[in-house]
Amino acid sequence: MSSFAPESKGVGSDSDASSYDAEDAVFFPGIDKIGFNSSAGHGETMVYRQYNPSEVVLGRTMEEWLRFSVCFWHTFRGTGADPFGFPTLTRPWDDGSNTLANARRRLRAAFEFFTKLGVKYWTFHDRDISPEGATLEETNKNLDEMADLALKLQNKTGVKLLWGTSNLFANPMYMNGAASNPDAHIFAYAAAQVKKCMEVAMRLGAQNFVFWGGREGYHTLLNTDVRMEQNHLAAFFRMAAAYKKKIGFTGNLLIEPKPKEPAKHQYDYDAMTVIAFLKTYGLDKEYKLNIEPNHTTLAGHGYEHDVVMASAFGLLGSVDSNTGSPDLGWDTDQFPMDVKNSTQVMRVIIEQGGLAPGGLNFDCKVRRESTELRDMFTAHIGAMDTFAKALKVAAAMKNSGLFDKQIKERYGSFSEGIGKKIDEGTTDFEELEAYVMGKGDPVAASGRQEHYETMFNTFL
Ligand code: XUL
Ligand code: CO
């Protein structure tokens, strides 16, 4: 996310926002619950043609496999402002004020949106849903008040909280980092903020709690002690895990890697960096990863790379299912519309037996030029259909057995003889040398990349 604007001003509109204060106010008039119709015409984009929640794929419903979630920050706090232009996304219920009344309207609009879309989960940062006050005490009081309303709306609609997280990056106090800040007082404030947010998330039945280290990194090494900063980060994560146990919160704790933006270098660079960090500090039993593919591509990897790596080490907890623009070099947080990329992700999710208690969270924002309320719907519908189709394609690939069989054959030399001994750890360099001397030099086999790529295409 890059356009987070907790105190965005100027998002006013001609309509009177307070007319949405009534309990029964309708925020999206003229838009009904989105239905499923697999034969809808090409021009219809307010309908699901792939996502049929109750359809069973590989023994589970689509809804169970996909666990879609809408994020509050982009979809209900995004203004369309960018470094070159003012807000473009005018929401009639949002008067741009930093008041609790405005926060309440946004939250009620959000639950109408989730319900009409038919999405069962949502995610938020503490500061998206609730305005900061003059002191931490006042800020916490506001958050409690907003949590009361969120709980009421969750109970009324059946929508659940996939995860909550603390915004430890927007407040100017955090400009030099939160848990990696050189000032212990700011470290303490960040700890207090997470403590409160975790309590609120638990009260709302969160299934996970996410940490994205927005400003945990450096801009110049000339003023930075990188080891001390990472020791502090580890201390912070250790205390968060201890507090989770203390209060009996049973959700998963997840760290979300990102290589850069806003910091020049962020410590949670990519999946393998976070895994090494967790193992270095003995935290790998307490934390899993929330992977965002746009961050993965920012790190210079292919779209599905971090999902594959995290899962391979048993640490894939959830996915912020978005995409970058392959021809741009920053975090554009676009809605994922590429079936091939999403299929690669769904293959991993199928292989590890699902994502629960994680899910596919749309950490995505409509383009600043997509200004109509219905664009909020079509963006999510298009992305959900993309992943639903990807699920079906990945299931067909799995059912064919072709990839499993050919990959198994490719590594076949490790299932017997000397290969088996390597895997079992029962051989050594001397024996391996003797093996080659006895057998003669090996001949390299083709990797057949184009064969695999062509085979993949046949399933699309
Ligand atoms: C930032 C990002 C965040 C996290 C939650 O790029 O993705 O929105 O998902 O803080
Ligand atoms: Co994210």
Image (cartoon, rainbow, N blue to C red):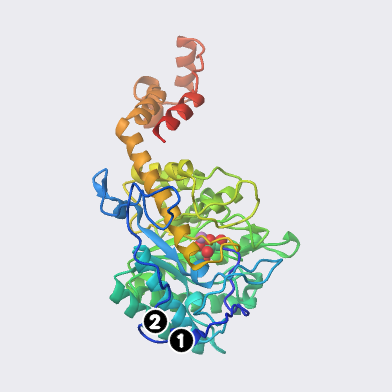
Kindly report the distance in space between the C-alpha atoms of the residues bearing marks 1 and 2.
8 Å
Q: Amino acid at mark 2?
A: Ala
Whether label 2 lies within 8 Å of ligand 1 gets the answer no
Above/below status of 227 relative to 451: below
Marks counted in the figure total: 2
**Residue 431 x %, y %:** 44, 20
**What residue is pinned by disc 1?**
19
Q: Earlier in the sequence, mark 1 or mark 2?
A: 1
Residue 254 image-quadrant placement: bottom left
Task: Estimate how packed mark 2 is, as few (under 14), some (14 to 19) or many (20 or more) residues with alpha carbons within 10 Å.
Answer: some
Instruction: For mark 1, give the secondary structure.
Output: helix
Decide which of 427, 403 is in the foreground and name it. Answer: 403
Please give the name of the residue rendered at 57% of the width and 89% of the height, measured from the top-left corner: 134
- Asked if residue 295 shows in the view, the reply is yes
Please give the name of the residue rendered at 40% of the width and 44% of the height, measured from the top-left corner: 390
Q: Amino acid at mark 1?
A: Ser
- Asked if residue 243 shows in the view, the reply is no
**What residue is pinned by disc 2?**
25
* Left-right relation of 74 to 347: right
Instruction: For mark 2, give the secondary structure.
Output: loop
Quadrant for the C terminus in the image: top left
Task: Estimate how packed mark 1 is, as few (under 14), some (14 to 19) or many (20 or more) residues with alpha carbons within 10 Å.
Answer: few
**Residue 297 x %, y %:** 58, 48
